[in-house]
Image (tube, rainbow, N blue to C red):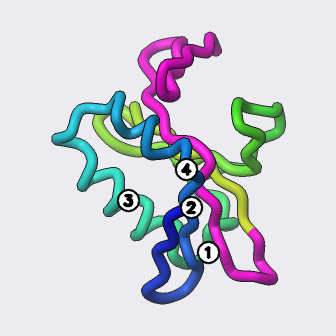
Amino acid sequence: MVVSHERGFARVFAPEVVAHLDTIEREFHSQIRKQIHLRLSSEPEKETRNRKPLDVPAPYGPQWELRFGPGNRFRVFYEVDPVERTVKILAIGVKERNVLRIGAEEYRT
């Protein structure tokens, strides 16, 4: 796991996330890192238009989903431990129409 903790909530990346990023165009990697930092460093459990708790179980068992990028195509799935003040990034994917790609896997929505 990779840990990033400058202030607020620490962001912990599951090892699988590296493989997920490998399937996303490199030109978007810095934007993805920036959005994770900006939106999940503080108040990761605050519901917004593009950040919501998940009612239905999703791949990798996350509690929350963050959407951003061109056409809201990127998805970050995560869980929060408010006691430890950590956000665990479980998966990063790309949503195109009704298909969510996480690494080599595809999920129909």
CB within 8 Å, label 3 to label 4: no
Amino acid type at circle 4 is Pro
Measured Cα–Cα span from mark 4 to mark 1:
24 Å
**Chain part drawn in magenta:** 81-109
- Disc 2 and disc 4: Cα gap in Å? 5 Å
Mark 3 and mark 1: Cα distance apart in space: 14 Å
Q: Mark 1 against mark 2, which lies toward the viewer?
A: 2
Q: Kindly identify the amino acid type of the residue bearing the numbered disc 3.
A: Gln
Q: Tell me where residue 29 appears, x and y as whole percent.
A: 27, 48
- Give the residue type that dot 1 points to: Glu
From the viewer's perspective, is the residue at label 3 or at label 4 nearer?
A: 4
Task: Say which residue label 2 marks.
Answer: 1
Of callouts 4 and 1, the N-terminal one: 4
Give the quadrant of residue 79: bottom right
**Which quarter shows the C terminus?**
top right
Q: Position of residue 22 (x, y in %)?
A: 34, 35
Label 3 close to label 2 by CB (< 8 Å):
no
Above or below, 44 relative to 47 = below
Residue 1 x, y percent position in the rendering: 56, 61
Query: Looking at the picture, how far across and down is residue 58, in whole percent?
Result: 73, 32
- Tag 2 or tag 1, which sits nearer the N-term? 2
Side (left or right) of 85 relative to 8: right
Q: Residues within 10 Å of mark 4 (few under 14, many from 20)?
A: few
Q: Residue furthest bottom?
A: 7
Closer to the chain start, of discs 2 and 4, is 2
| Residue shown at 66% from the left, 74% from the top | 86
Please give left or right for residue 31 compared with residue 102 in the image: left
Q: Residue at x 66, y 59 (%)?
A: 47
Q: Which residue is mark 1?
A: 43
Secondary structure type for disc 3: helix
